[in-house]
Amino acid sequence: MVIARSSNLLGKITVVFVICFLVMVSLCLNTALALDGSGTQEDPWLIQSLDDFNDFAADANYWDDYTRLETDVNLAGLTYTTAVIAPDTNNAFDSGFNGIAFTGAFDGNYHTISNFNYTSTGKSYVGLFGYIYDPNAEIKDLVLIDPNLYAENGEYVGSLVGYLSAGTIDNCYIEGGNVSGDKYVGGLVGNGSSKITNCCATGGVIGNRYVGGLVGYYLNGSFSNCYSTGDVSGYYRVGGLVGGIVVASVSNCCSTGDVSGIFHVGGLVGANDEESNVSNCCSTGDVNSVERVGGLVGFNVGSISKCYSTGSVSGDWEVGGLVGINVGSVSKCYSTGTVSGNWEVGGLVGANGDLDPGSISNCYSIGDLIGYYRVGGLVGWNYYGSVSNCFSESDVNGVEHVGGLLGDNNANSSLLNCFWDINIQNHGVTESIGYDSGTSTNVAGLPTAQMKTRSTFTDADWDFINVWNIGENQTYPYLRVYLPSDINKDGIVNFLDIAITANQWMEGVE
């Protein structure tokens, strides 16, 4: 009887032990419970140590929730061979992303992640985050300090994100470091879409195709209020800020680093493609390339407005202070850097128009230039385009087809209401257009005094209310920038603006 009872009790104890063991295993497998929080917006998972960060990076259960960084994280001593979070598990270039995408929200909470080091070859989707795909996904308020990524022939390489397919990156900062790869390589993001705002990168970037100081390639989205300061080098479609954009917009951005490449190279954007626009942007670094190189944009198919470039530009063919070749539109822009090249060299645009027309309006160039063939103070070759209401203050030096405004005005092209300063020419230039087989109307070289007189331009129908301003007898025309409170657009904010606003407000009061 005693033995029987003892056996029965042992069996019950065994069953209880097995149940407890299974529960413990289940709890251990559900590693999401390792972090404090519950993963909601109101109660996010909290990363409070390096161990917590490692748990977060290792467990995809976190990646579709809300997470907040509560401390600085130092990754010194670690070298990664895949993306830290949401890595590709196949790594074959032609297979697309294979793995679990990050779809959640990561709040850096103004903390830093430092010393992220990556070294590997032949892998894609490389970055702190490998792949992000969700319209509601977000990374914000995060600083990466000294990230160094050497991906060699890798694709989609960025210190923060390798491939941003959908989602938002806001208020993120990359301080120092270097990023290198093959295609789609950026200081912040390798390949992006959706939305990037208030971000910057200061490290160097090296790649082959689609290489940018901030983003390598950007499709179908917008980014604004961003800047980059690192030097950038590559081969094709290389930009100080972004290598190439398609169906996208870039606004209120600037780049200051030097840029070098071979084809489609720009101080800000390498190639501004179809249905894309660049506005209120600038570039100040020096740019060097072989073909289609511009101080701001190398190759423009979209629109560029209210932008400027100040760095020196050098190349061989289709070299412009602002744009290398334009088959889109350029308006209310200027360039001030020196320009040097051989063929189709322009103070503002190297070549305007190609198989498609290009238009340039309300622009000017100041930087001196030197070239060999088709050299113009404003445009080297107006091949299949229109230029209107522009002026050049550039000293022009060339050999064949050289003009104060245009080197060559093709039969399918036009030039209207444009002027250049004859007093600053030190290389014998006397013609507005070096070779003209197109249409030119109200085009002239004028002495400096007339170039600083408002009536010179108002008589040519220039808009001095909404577009231009001038310091009478003191300055050349300059593009007007209005304060929101300058209601009557007279360049100053005073009682007249207040009176107009009050009158309009009173009209709506019964």
Image: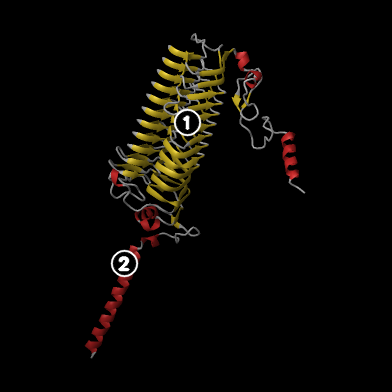
Please state if 419 lies on the left or on the right of 208 as rendered. Answer: right
Q: Which amino acid does label 2 sit on?
A: Val
Please provide percent x and percent y for residue 353.
Answer: 45, 26
Answer above or below: position of 170 versus 42: above
Please give the name of the residue rendered at 33% of the width and 68% of the height, measured from the top-left corner. 24
SS for dot 2: helix
Checking the image for residue 407, the label placed there is none
Residue 399 image-quadrant placement: top left
Q: Which amino acid does label 1 sit on?
A: Gly
Residue 422 image-quadrant placement: top right
Answer above or below: position of 7 versus 472: below
Residue found at the very far top of the displayed protein: 428
Please provide percent x and percent y for residue 320.
Answer: 45, 23
Nearer to us in this view, 129 or 91: 91
Please provide percent x and percent y for residue 433.
Answer: 50, 15
Q: Is residue 32 in sight in this rendering? A: yes
Residue located beneath label 1 in the image: 328
Q: What is the C-alpha distance between the residues marked 1 and 2?
A: 63 Å
SS for dot 1: loop
Dot 1 or dot 2: first in sequence order is 2
Residue found at the very far bottom of the displayed protein: 1
Residue located beneath label 2 in the image: 25
Please provide percent x and percent y for residue 39.
Answer: 44, 59
Please state if 82 lies on the left or on the right of 505 as rendered. Answer: left
Nearer to us in this view, 291 or 125: 291
Nearer to us in this view, 120 or 79: 120
Residue 5 image-quadrant placement: bottom left
Please state if 82 lies on the left or on the right of 38 as rendered. Answer: left
Q: Is residue 171 in sight in this rendering? A: no
User: Mark 2: few, some, or many residues within 10 Å (few <14, many ≥20)?
Assistant: few
